[in-house]
Amino acid sequence: MARLRPSRLALPALLAAAVCGAAAAQPAGSFTATIKTPDGANVGTAVLTEAPTGVLIRVEVKGLTPGWHGMHLHEKGDCSDAKFMNAGGHLQMSGMKMPHGLLAAGGPDDGDLPNLFVQPDGAAKAEAFSTRVTLKGAEGRTMLLGPTGSALMIHSSADDQTTQPIGGAGPRVACAVIRQ
C-alpha cells in the first residue's frame, strides 16, 4: 500500500480546463507575467492569482506550434538565455526532491502542471490550479515570488507525466519570468 504524505501530494492539487471567451479583469492578489520565445517575441501572458489553498494560473498564448506542450514551473525567474536554461529545473520546496510527473509514484514535484493544448491556429487559453505553490509565502507551499522568483516554462512536446526528469517534454520553447 502506498504511503501518502501530507496534503502536498494530493493529485487533485493540479487541475486544468480550457478557458473560453474573453479574459476577465485581473483579481486582487494577482501577478501577470509575459510569455516570450527564445528570440524575445511576446507570445502571451500568464496571470497567477493567489487563492486560499494555492495559485490559479491562467495562460493565454499565440504563435506556438499546434498540439500538446508540457508546462512547468521552474526554480528561477530568469529567461535571459536562448534555451531558457537559466530558469533552472522544476520548482521544488527547499530540501525536497520529488519525482517528476502528475502520474509518477512519489510525485509530483512542485513545478508539475498539466499539458497545454495549442489549437491549429497557434493559440491556446488554459487554466491550471496548484495547491503546491503560493505567490508570496503561504506556509507549507513553495513561493513563486521569492528572492530569485520562478518561471513558467512551455516545452516543445507533451509531458507524459511519468518519465524522469521532464516527462519527455523536449526543449523549452516559451518562458515567463515570475519575479517582482
Image (cartoon, grey):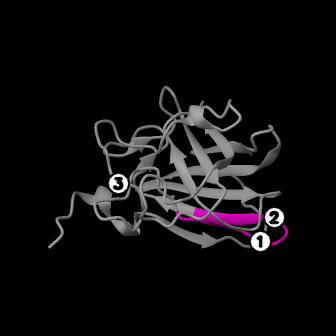
Left or right: 109 in relation to 60: left
User: What mark, if any, has residue 119 been given in the picture?
Assistant: 1
Label 3 crowd (10 A; few <14 / some 14-19 / many >=20): many
| Residue bounds of the magenta highlight | 114-127
Q: Nearer the viewer, mark 2 or mark 3?
A: 3
Q: Amino acid at mark 1?
A: Gln
Amino acid at dot 2: Gly
Residue extending furthest toward the top: 147
116 lies above or below 92 = below
Find numbered disc 1 in the image and state the secondary structure of the residue it sits on.
loop
Q: Quadrant of the C terminus?
A: top right
Asked whether residue 5 is drawn in magenta, I would say: no
Mark positioned earlier in the residue sequence (2 or 3): 3
Frontmost residue, 18 versus 65: 65
44 relative position to 105: left or right? right
Q: Nearer the viewer, residue 36 or 82?
A: 82
Name the residue that disc number 2 marks.
Answer: 122
Give the x, y percent position of residue 168: 53, 59
The residue identified by callout 3 is 99
Residue 98: tell me if it is visible.
yes
> At which x and y percent is residue 87?
56, 36
Q: CA distance from mark 2 to mark 3?
A: 31 Å
Q: Work out how far the residue at label 1 is from the one at label 3, CA to CA, in angstroms.
A: 30 Å
Report the side of 125 relative to 70 (left or right): right
Q: Quadrant of the N terminus?
A: bottom left
Q: Answer above or below: position of 4 versus 100.
A: below
**In the image, is residue 23 above or below residue 95?**
below
State yes or no: discs 2 and 1 in contact (Cβ < 8 Å). Answer: yes
Kind of residue indicated by mark 3: Pro
Whichever of labels 1 and 3 marks the residue nearer the N terminus, that label is: 3
